[in-house]
Image (tube, rainbow, N blue to C red):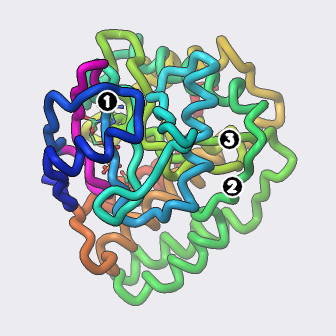
Amino acid sequence: MSVYTTVSDDMMQSWLSRYALGQLVELKGIAAGVTNTNYFVTTTHGRYVLTIFETLKLQELPYYLTLMSHLARHGVACPAPVADNTDQFASLLAGKPACLVSCLSGADISQPSAIQCRAVGEMLAQMHVASATFPRKMKNPRGPRWWSETASAMYGFMDEADAASLRQEIQFQDQHRFDHLPSGVIHADLFKDNVLMDGDKIAGFIDFYYACNDILLYDVAIAFNDWTRLEDGSISPERATAFLAGYQSVRALTAEEVRAWPVMLRAAALRFWTSRLLDLYQPMAGELTYTKDPKVFQRLVEAHRQRSDFWL
Ligand SMILES: Nc1ncnc2c1ncn2[C@@H]1O[C@H](COP(=O)(O)OP(=O)(O)OP(=O)(O)O)[C@@H](O)[C@H]1O
Ligand SMILES: N[C@@H](CCO)C(=O)O
């Protein structure tokens, strides 16, 4: 259950007076989610999602919220933040930064079909294209420097063979730089649990709080590694082909991107291998973590090393 910050009906009603959204009808905590507190808020005007940010600061929010607003305005399926009477997307509630966004239909799915993978690939490309005109910039806090430094702090916790495999991957990635590839705004965490599906349609991408400016192909690889992976850890060729066809139906990959793809798949898997190791061995104080298994991404890195077919 992740309602870390409790909001009473009275607090909510009073905070809602900042908005042109009518009167509070119902306030209901959302159990899913790990990092933030989320509520469904029904008012006399409609249904919204309240997010209370447990770690991000008020001054850090404009990048993410104006990005979501920009994307929603361009027709990308994602929640639209609602501005208050002072034209701000976020303000303090119960002493923490909070915002309201539109409530989407649909639910996340764990076993996507090829058709659903195609739809996600297509919407991801739409997001990349639409964000080309987004003016703000954010560096990726979890790029190559971050994973090198984090891995150095993890080797001591790992058994020797696993540490050697991680070291090998960091060294391999150090020999490859992608600064020449197309870059832009990336979601950076487009896993299955961050997409709400309504049948075969994308109801919306959510959880933009790792979004940043980086290589577009890296975003494609992050989503690909999660959406096309079967429960046994192997990549489904049907899902893989459909996902990439969906992406390329909107934005064709350049020849340089196609050449970089095998290395990028490994980089994207390395990023989550490292973050899961960090969550396992050095969880943040007070954080409620359902620790996710780092081995899943270790195995994926190692499988990508052996591959000769990359679905492109
Ligand atoms: N705009 C929305 N419309 C409908 N449901 C939403 C919306 N935003 C979030 N949700 C629901 O709330 C749940 C939790 O949201 P989310 O995954 O963003 O939580 P978080 O704690 O902020 O992030 P994380 O779990 O990635 O750390 C989602 O699984 C989804 O069911
Ligand atoms: N999607 C991440 C967790 C949130 O960043 C993972 O599965 O490791």
Residue depth check, mark 1 versus mark 3: number of the one nearer the observer: 1
* Crowd around label 1: few <14 · some 14–19 · many ≥20 (10 Å): many
Q: Quadrant of the C terminus?
A: top right
Q: CA distance from mark 2 to mark 3?
A: 9 Å
* Crowd around label 2: few <14 · some 14–19 · many ≥20 (10 Å): few
User: Where residue 309 appears, x then y in whole percent?
Assistant: 58, 32
Q: In percent of the image, x 57 and y 70: which residue is there?
A: 147
| Residue 41 forms part of the magenta stretch | yes
Tag 3's secondary structure? strand
Q: Amino acid at mark 3?
A: Val
**Residue 185 - label:** 3
Q: Nearer the viewer, residue 253 or 279?
A: 279
Q: Amino acid at mark 2?
A: Met
Tag 2's secondary structure? loop
Q: CA distance from mark 1 to mark 3?
A: 25 Å
Q: Amino acid at mark 1?
A: Tyr
Q: Is residue 214 left or right of residue 98?
A: right
Q: Nearer the viewer, residue 218 or 202?
A: 202
The residue identified by callout 2 is 138
User: Where residue 132 appears, x then y in whole percent?
Assistant: 76, 32
The answer to whether one can see residue 188 in this image is yes
